[in-house]
Amino acid sequence: MAPKDGFHVLRHTCASIMLEAGESVVTLARRLGHSSPAVTLGYYARFMPEAGSKGRNAIDGLLGKRGEAHAGRSSPDSPQGR
């Protein structure tokens, strides 16, 4: 591996670890110097394990048990929604 590639690998590693830890995409985009968070998402969305579930869990919490039963069936992340 060339020395210049070492820094790039380190940059990707740092970004993926930060996202897995829950860092904001907007904050990460600024740190990486990307023109927009959309660019960052294009490269790193797969490193966001909770993507989709945080908002769904918040709504479920507001709706209580009734919301949990309905969210499982209509969720795009559920097997039935695919």
Image: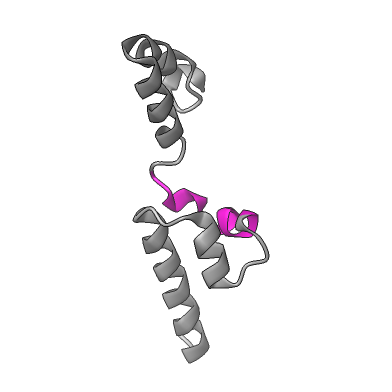
x then y, percent, for residue 79 = 43, 21
> Residue 57 sits in which quadrant?
top left
Q: Is residue 76 left or right of residue 66?
A: right
Residue 63: x percent and y percent? 39, 15
Q: Quadrant of residue 73?
A: top left
Residue at x 63% of width, y 54% of height: 38
Q: Is 36 displayed left or right of 56 in the figure?
A: right
Say above or below: 61 vs 50.
above
Q: Residue furthest left?
A: 65
In the image: residue 45, left or right of residue 10: right
Tell which residue pokes out farthest to the bottom in this image. Answer: 3
Image point 49% across, 16% down: which residue? Answer: 74
* Nearest the eye: 24 or 8: 24
Determine the residue positioned at 41% across, 36% down. 54
The magenta stretch spans residue 43: yes
- Give the colouring mode of the picture: one colour
Viewer-side residue, 48 vs 82: 48
> In this picture, is 4 found above or below 73?
below
User: What type of secondary structure mainly makes up the magenta span?
Assistant: helix
Look at the image and give the residue range highlighted in magenta: 38-49
Q: How many marks?
A: 0
Q: Is residue 31 above or below residue 18?
A: below
Is 64 one of the magenta-colored residues? no
In the rendered image, the residue lying farthest to the right is: 35
Q: Name the quadrant of the N terminus.
A: bottom left
At x 40%, y 29%, the residue is: 58
